[in-house]
């Protein structure tokens, strides 16, 4: 918790305008290139314990991601924001901006809201490239008008380079965890501690962590496994996975691998950069046009990392993930790959006994699969 608050205070000291972005994959580089500081409002698990403000506006059967983001924005912490960005990530997040706007209006501190619509039709069905390029163009115009700043392609290039560096450092850390030089738990601590930092500080911090763990001796991998879901499981669950003799060697987590897995270079315009960024994004159930590529992607990741099973980390009330889990579990079973689903709800993260039992049973199934 301390690291999030410390990092947020540090951000405030920069006196730059801060844009709170609703998950999952906002166009961070645009905001940064225009002198703004974008923060993606997930990873708030350790900071937000009470949901009083959120509960006044959202049903308690909304996912924890939306509830915590709403709590952050509508409570005192939200006063550090100068704007909110949202796109059509999922049904919950589609409706959230309007709710937040009204809540902020009632609280007497309205904020400018910036929205884009990402076309969700597969490109093979319809080419919405022109429409989306216009969305990016319009976002930039609105930011210019609202904050009296101007866009520069040179500064955008610099921002692309910096964010790509951050994604690259996360990928290197994941490789360190896969090789046994870094416990996955240490990776998660570094990931958490790098959240809510300016991108330049993230690069400094993560580079230091990569250098530190590169020097370590690798530990033997017992049973390599993958985790998949929207958010990584809480640290006690990661510890339970390790204690069961499993090692997380790869992840298909939205806030981790799906987020840092692909970073295009700037080849032409800013609009085209984001056409590429979203079109070729790591498949995610919230990017509907990528849904057909999900299974192939998971299987190739399992193959490349020799992972022997998958732990699905279900974010309670996330329809997008829950529609997919039964199909994935069935198809993995057909391939002889064991999987297990553990569910994380907003209020049961401190009570992991049942999850631990499921993980232990899963570890046995993975062990029995050995050598097949
Ligand atoms: S966890 Fe699922 S429902 Fe919640 S914000 Fe993310 S994608 Fe939407």
Image: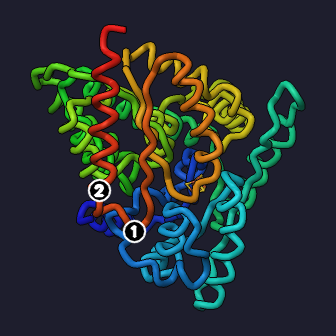
Q: Residue furthest right?
A: 126
Label 2 sits on a secondary structure element that is loop
Dot 1 alpha-carbon crowd within 10 angstroms: few under 14, some 14 to 19, many 20 or more: few
- Return the residue nearer the eye: 81 or 364: 364
- Given this view, does label 2 or label 1 mark the residue nearer the observer? 2
Dot 2 alpha-carbon crowd within 10 angstroms: few under 14, some 14 to 19, many 20 or more: some
Q: Residue furthest top?
A: 371
Numbered-mark total: 2
Query: Relative to residue 50, is residue 301 drawn left or right?
Result: right
Q: Residue at x 54, y 72 (%)?
A: 70
Cα gap from disc 2 to disc 1, whole angstroms = 11 Å
Q: Residue at x 50, y 53 (%)?
A: 315
Label 1 sits on a secondary structure element that is loop
- Image coloring type: rainbow
- Give whichever of discs 2 and 1 has the lower sequence position: 1
For residue 1, what is the image quadrant?
bottom left
| 28 is higher (above) or lower (below) than 162 | below
- Return the residue nearer the eye: 352 or 361: 361
Q: Position of residue 296 (x, y in %)?
A: 60, 20
Residue for badge 1:
347
For residue 337, what is the image quadrant?
top left
| 8 is higher (above) or lower (below) than 268 | below
Q: Position of residue 190 (x, y in %)?
A: 26, 45
Query: Relative to residue 299, is residue 371 drawn left or right?
Result: left
Residue for badge 2:
352
Q: Ligand 1, what quadrant? A: bottom right
| 98 is higher (above) or lower (below) than 270 | below
Query: Relative to residue 219, is residue 233 drawn left or right?
Result: right
Q: Residue at x 36, y 46 (%)?
A: 200
């Amino acid at each position: 918790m301390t690291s999030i608050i410390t990092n947020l205070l540090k951000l405030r000291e920069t006196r730059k305008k801060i844009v709170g972005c609703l998950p999952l994959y906002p166009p961070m580089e645009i905001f940064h290139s225009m002198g703004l500081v974008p923060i993606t409002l997930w990873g708030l698990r350790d900071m937000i314990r009470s949901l009083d403000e959120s509960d006044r506006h959202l049903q308690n059967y909304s996912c924890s991601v939306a509830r915590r983001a709403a709590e952050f924005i509508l409570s005192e912490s939200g006063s550090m924001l100068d704007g909110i960005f949202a796109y059509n990530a999922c049904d919950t997040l589609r409706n959230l901006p309007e709710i937040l706007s009204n809540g902020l209006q009632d609280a007497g501190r309205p904020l400018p809201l910036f929205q884009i619509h990402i076309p969700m039709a597969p490109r093979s069905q319809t080419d919405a490239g022109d429409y989306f390029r216009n969305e990016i163009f319009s976002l930039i115009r609105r930011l210019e008008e609202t904050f009296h700043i101007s866009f520069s392609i040179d500064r955008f290039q610099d921002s692309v380079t910096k964010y790509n560096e951050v994604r690259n450092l996360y990928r290197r850390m994941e490789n360190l965890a896969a090789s046994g030089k870094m416990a996955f738990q240490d990776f998660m601590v570094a990931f958490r501690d790098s959240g809510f930092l300016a991108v330049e500080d993230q690069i400094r911090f993560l580079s230091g962590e990569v250098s530190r763990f590169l020097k370590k001796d690798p530990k033997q991998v017992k049973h390599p496994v993958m985790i998949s879901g929207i958010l990584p499981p809480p640290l006690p669950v990661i510890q339970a996975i390790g204690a069961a003799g499993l090692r997380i060697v790869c992840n298909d987590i939205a806030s981790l691998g799906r987020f840092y897995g692909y970073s295009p270079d700037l080849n032409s315009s800013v609009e085209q950069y984001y056409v590429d960024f979203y079109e070729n994004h790591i498949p995610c159930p919230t990017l509907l046009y990528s849904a057909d590529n999900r299974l192939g992607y998971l299987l190739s990741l399992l193959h490349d990392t020799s992972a022997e099973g998958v732990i699905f980390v279900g974010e309670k009330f996330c329809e997008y993930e829950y529609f997919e889990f039964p199909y994935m579990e069935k198809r993995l079973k057909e391939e002889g790959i064991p999987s297990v689903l553990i569910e994380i709800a907003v209020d049961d993260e401190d009570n992991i006994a049942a999850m631990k039992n499921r993980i232990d049973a899963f570890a046995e199934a993975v062990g029995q699969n050995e050598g097949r």
